[in-house]
């Protein structure tokens, strides 16, 4: 399990898991850290059967990495893209591998901002998050097209609405976080009760962490997907395509839909994003 803080990652493991799970350092906002992690894994000589690209940041004020790239696009997409490319020899060596990208129904907020992906003029944190989540889906689509013949399949997963997972905006470039929505806003959305406890209602996509992880496990392991790839999954199934999506508004009640929309699975956009991402990594 790779993390910016391996000690904190280790402390999150269930009792007894430390004997079975190794933690290692990886900062997806730092290209050198990504290359170093990939090199360490390749040096181990182990094949890689399942890669789950799960890390992410959400909204908040504008933060840029050392290259000047907007941090949500750089972390949620480019970091995972660079990591996946770096681990390609190990994925091929598995002779049957899956790459699972965690996305969100928030992909509906924004297509890729082809003319200004890093918000050089104007900034909207929610649009930045939506763009990065669209990129997660497009990466799964194009990865599957390019690598399926090597036995490597790609999937994008919407886990549902899962509170209490520390996903939220950075206050700055450090670790301190502030809630994305206040308790009053969460209560108005019907996500927490009067005492501040999360309301669990899977039929409305409000899930526990374990329920939210279920579709990730499905994507990574289910034999039902043995001959299927490049798809967006939710609720342990392939999402229908919403060809006429209404406006998506975070914080709305009822909870907005999360079915995949056309801009996130467009094959031409997927190829275009792959090529753009390669150029950005070389810049």
Image (cartoon, grey):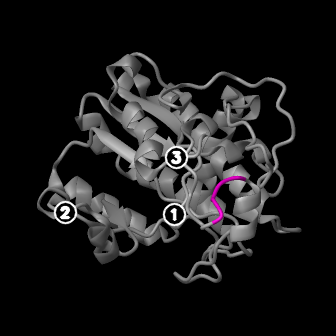
Residue 15 badge: 2
Which dot marks residue 164?
Answer: 1
Q: Quadrant location of the N terminus?
A: bottom left
Q: Is residue 229 above or below residue 250?
A: above
Q: What is the distance, in whole Å, between disc 3 and disc 1 at their CAs? A: 11 Å
Neighbours of disc 2 within 10 Å: few (<14), some (14-19), many (20+)? few
Q: Residue at label 3?
A: 207
Q: Position of residue 15 (x, y in %)?
A: 19, 62
Magenta stretch bounds: 190-194
Q: Going by the image, does 105 lie left or right of 254?
A: left
Q: Please state the horizontal and vertical placement of residue 186, each as a whole percent of the image.
A: 70, 61
Crowd class of label 3 (few under 14; some 14 to 19; many from 20; radius 10 Å): many
Tell me if residue 283 can be seen: no
Total numbered labels: 3
Q: Is residue 153 visible?
A: yes
The residue nearer to you, when weighing 7 against 115, is 7
């Amino acid at each position: 399990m790779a993390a910016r803080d391996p000690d904190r990652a280790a402390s999150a493991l269930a009792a007894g898991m430390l004997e079975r799970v190794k933690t290692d350092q990886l900062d997806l906002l730092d290209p050198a850290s990504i290359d170093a992690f990939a090199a360490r894994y390749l040096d181990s000589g182990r094949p890689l059967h399942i890669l789950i690209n799960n890390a992410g940041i959400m909204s908040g004020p504008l933060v840029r990495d050392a290259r000047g790239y907007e941090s949500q696009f750089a972390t949620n997409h480019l970091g995972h893209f660079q990591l996946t490319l770096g681990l390609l020899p190990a994925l091929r060596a598995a002779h049957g591998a899956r790459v699972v990208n965690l996305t969100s129904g928030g992909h509906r907020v924004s297509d890729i901002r082809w003319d200004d992906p890093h918000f050089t003029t104007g900034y909207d944190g929610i649009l930045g998050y939506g763009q990065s989540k669209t990129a997660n889906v497009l990466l799964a689509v194009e990865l599957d097209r390019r690598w399926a013949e090597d036995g490597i399949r790609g999937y994008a997963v919407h886990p549902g609405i899962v509170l209490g997972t520390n996903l939220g905006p950075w206050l700055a470039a450090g670790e301190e976080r502030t809630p994305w929505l206040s308790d009053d806003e969460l209560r108005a959305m019907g996500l927490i009760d009067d005492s501040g406890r999360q309301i669990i209602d899977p039929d409305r996509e409000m899930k526990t962490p374990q329920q939210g992880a279920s579709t990730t496990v499905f994507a990574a392991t289910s034999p039902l997907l043995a001959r299927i790839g490049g798809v967006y999954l939710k609720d342990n199934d392939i999402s229908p395509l919403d060809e006429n999506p209404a406006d998506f508004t975070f914080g709305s009640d009822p909870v907005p839909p999360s079915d995949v929309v056309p801009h996130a699975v467009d094959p031409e956009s997927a190829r275009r994003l792959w090529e753009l991402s390669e150029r950005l990594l070389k810049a």
